[in-house]
Amino acid sequence: MPAERKPLNKYRKPRPGPSTSTKTSERPSEHKVLPVDQRSEGALPGLSKIKSAIRQTKRLLAKETLEPGLRIATQRRLTSLEADLAAAERREVEKKNGAKYHKVKFFERQKLLRLTKRLNRKISEEGKSEKKKARYEQDLTDARVMLNYVLHYPNTQKYISLFPSNATTASTSKPEDEIDEEDSKSKLSLPPLLHPAPSNPSKLDQSAQRRYELLQETLKLMDEGKLSKEPEVEVTSGKTLGSGVEIGLGRSNVVSQNKDGKKTVEEEEEKDDFFEADD
């Protein structure tokens, strides 16, 4: 009696065919090292890794028996690593200052948004004299310049506040005939940083002089169309003109050396009043 045949297993694995894959070593390398300016910030390694790689590269270059071709390639690698180190240090400074000054920038932005809203309302009111309307329009322009100052201040530098605690308020710097009832009752007023203009800016202290220079630069960028002339409208809509523009980039950070000989960025603390009530 013939033996019974087993039923075919339709789930049986197929036999492996001829391999069409190539070895990894035979494939051409597709990895390319991008220039430093084309790399994203997240692609940069940490400071410790970059410094370690620089030390290893310098030790390799110190060998007298190094082949000329390898020496040239190693020197190029060292140049690239030093550029990476500068970019990583800048990233760390931006990250630190962004966290440190986030609160003061937020409150000053909110203050200026309230001021622009109030000044727009005053300008649209009827029954105001031409002299008062002209003053409100000038104050509105100054408030918009200050708002752009806050929005485009570089994180690589120490933030200089627009509302320091020791600043003279706008109401006390104006003539009595120009102070209306609403300004006298409100605790929030526009600081007199642009108008009236300082008679001699060089006599101001270092922070005040630097702040005045940045405000003038911001006003110039607005006149050139690189920054919005109505930043309060774009802030509320979420679209800001010149989002990649930063003011004050012509000035480098102040660097000093501590007792160990290491370079450190000097920072000055500045007290600010953030919680002034509005009307």
Image: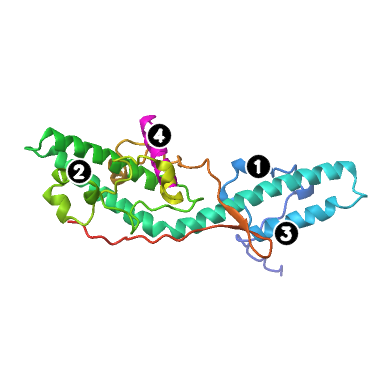
- From mark 4 to mark 3, how far is it between C-alphas? 42 Å
* Mark 3 / mark 2, whichever is N-terminal: 3
Q: Can residue 20 be seen at all in this image of the molecule?
A: no
Taking the spot 73% from the left edge, 44% from the top edge, the residue there is 29
- From mark 3 to mark 2, how far is it between C-alphas? 56 Å
Q: Is mark 3 on a helix, strand or loop?
A: helix
Q: Which of marks 1 and 3 is in front?
A: 3
What amino acid is found at the position of numbered circle 4 in the picture? Leu
Task: Classify mark 2: residues with Cα within 10 Å, few (<14), some (14-19) or many (20+).
Answer: many
Task: Classify mark 4: residues with Cα within 10 Å, few (<14), some (14-19) or many (20+).
Answer: some
What amino acid is found at the position of numbered circle 2 in the picture? Leu
What amino acid is found at the position of numbered circle 1 in the picture? Leu
The mark found on residue 80 in the picture is none
- From mark 1 to mark 3, how far is it between C-alphas? 21 Å
The location of residue 261, given as percent across then percent down, is: 69, 61
241 horizontally vs 85: left or right: left
Taking the spot 63% from the left edge, 43% from the top edge, the residue there is 36
* Mark 1 / mark 2, whichever is N-terminal: 1
Q: Is residue 48 above or below residue 204?
A: below
Residue that carries the numbered disc 2 in the rendered image: 119
- From mark 1 to mark 4, how far is it between C-alphas? 32 Å
The mark found on residue 34 in the picture is 1
Q: Do the residues labelled 2 and 4 touch (CB within 8 Å)?
A: no
Residue that carries the numbered disc 3 in the rendered image: 52
Residue that carries the numbered disc 4 in the rendered image: 221
- From mark 1 to mark 2, how far is it between C-alphas? 50 Å
What amino acid is found at the position of numbered circle 3 in the picture? Ser
Task: Classify mark 1: residues with Cα within 10 Å, few (<14), some (14-19) or many (20+).
Answer: few
Q: Do the residues labelled 4 and 3 touch (CB within 8 Å)?
A: no
- Residue nearer the viewer, 8 or 216: 216
